[in-house]
Image: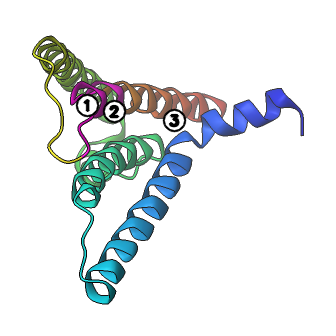
Amino acid sequence: MTVVKMLAYFVRHLEEIVIGLSMIVMIVINFGNVLCRYVINFSFGFTEELCVMLFILVSFMGAAMAARYRNHLGFDMLLEKFPPKMRKAVETATLVLTLALMGIMFYYGLSRCRNLYRYKSVSASMRIPEWIPGLIIPAGSIAIGIRTIQAYLEKYRRDKTR
């Protein structure tokens, strides 16, 4: 497999890769923490903090993946209510509203990161700068926006070829 093909695969399946790796890390550290708690009566404090950060990442990547594969409940449920000629208008409006919401989340997420950076806020257990995991919100918003646009364009390219 060439480097270009590997990179293309990685970009196509970014969400799945991130979700899979994050879930593995969450399972391993939680299992290890439970095992340590019951075997040697010691608990690692950072595991809860790291799992919350990874859970937020998994949530955003899952939303981006659902947008990419058009698996959000609202898409089909809403579209089935309209006649075929209105569906494209409704889907376009949905795209615009989704992008507007992602733009707002990006703006306020980035603003929050700037404040966390400015005030040098660090996490309680791991003592890492909070702006670093805070970047999940603007990055996740970008991922959802890109995958929403991608799904929209792919659907209408498919419809034109039929």
Instruction: Look at label 3 and name its amino acid.
Output: Lys
Closer to us: 60 or 25? 25
Alpha carbon separation for disc pair 2 and 1: 5 Å
Instruction: Look at label 2 and name its amino acid.
Output: Gly
Choose top left, top right, bottom left or bottom right for residue 134.
top left
| Crowd around label 1: few <14 · some 14–19 · many ≥20 (10 Å) | many
Instruction: Look at label 1 and name its amino acid.
Output: Ile
Helix, strand or loop at disc 3? Answer: helix
Say which label, 3 or 2, has the lower sequence index.
2
- Give left or right: position of 144 versus 52: right
Q: Residue at x 51, y 26 (%)?
A: 153
- Give left or right: position of 101 versus 139: left
Helix, strand or loop at disc 2? Answer: helix
Asked if residue 66 can be seen in this view, the reply is yes
Alpha carbon separation for disc pair 3 and 2: 22 Å
Residue picked out by circle 2 = 140
Q: Residue at x 38, y 76 (%)?
A: 31
Helix, strand or loop at disc 1? Answer: helix
- Residue 155 is labelled as 3
Tell me the magenta residue range: 126-140
The chosen color scheme is rainbow
- Residue 137 is labelled as 1
Say which label, 1 or 3, has the lower sequence index.
1
Q: Nearer the viewer, mark 1 or mark 3?
A: 1
Q: Nearer the viewer, mark 3 or mark 2?
A: 2
Q: Quadrant of the C terminus?
A: top right
Give the prevailing secondary structure in the magenta stretch: helix
Q: Is residue 44 above or below residue 104?
A: below
